[in-house]
Image (cartoon, helix red, strand yellow):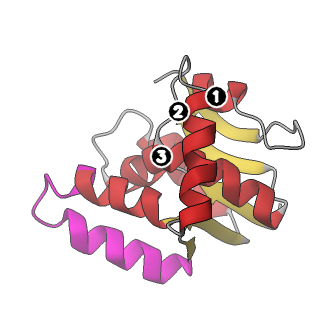
Amino acid sequence: MKNLLIDTGPIVAYLDAKERTHIEVSEVLDRFAGQLLTTSAVITETMHFVSEAQTGPRLLADFVLASGMHIVDFAQPLELRQAADLMEKYSDVPMDYADATLVLLAERLDVQNILTLDRRGFSAYRTSHKRSLNQILGYHS
């Protein structure tokens, strides 16, 4: 596994030892030797959750730096339309903007592996080539 997409839930769980999935996520991330990939939407969502703790934002920033995480932005007009189209298509699941950007990133970089806690969502989502993502972890959220 060379590249790994990472969703909000695992980042929050990794940074907060009180999260129920902290140990499982930590084991995966501590063993992983490839490139972590995510989107600015995921980072924004994560920052929202970790900011409840005084040191949360600093922990997130330090983790992103230490891991060498590659962050891609999907805020250009065409990308926003593509994300909105996906959110509409999967409104019954549902899909949020951060999830949509991860599906777009998987397609753009041809990455199939994702670290997520959202088994329900990422079991349903598909790229435009009808390809599913391989969930490294997944819990119904």
Return the residue nearer the eye: 21 or 60: 60
In the rendered image, the quadrant that contains the C terminus is top left
Tell whether label 2 touches label 1 (CB within 8 Å).
Answer: yes
Residue 97: which disc? 3
Q: Which percent across, then down, holds residue 93?
A: 56, 20
Q: Along the polypeptide, which appears first: circle 1 or circle 3?
A: 1
| Res. 35 in view | yes
Question: For residue 1, which quarter of the picture?
Answer: bottom right
Q: Which percent across, then down, holds residue 95?
A: 52, 33
Residue 3: which disc? none
Residue 89: which disc? 1
CA separation in Å, label 1 and label 3: 12 Å
Position above or below: 111 against 40: above
The residue carrying mark 2 is: 95
Return the residue nearer the eye: 115 or 88: 88
Q: Residue furthest top?
A: 92
SS state under label 1: helix
SS state under label 2: loop
| Res. 28 in view | no
Q: Which percent across, then down, holds residue 52?
A: 13, 52
Q: Which percent across, then down, holds residue 86?
A: 63, 38
- Camera-near label (1 vs 2) is 1
Residue at left offset 81%, top offset 50%:
112
Please, what is the three-letter code of the amino acid marked with disc 1?
Lys
- 123 lies left or right of 7: right
- 62 lies left or right of 95: left
Q: Is residue 71 magenta?
A: no
Return the residue nearer the eye: 34 or 99: 99
- Camera-near label (1 vs 3) is 1
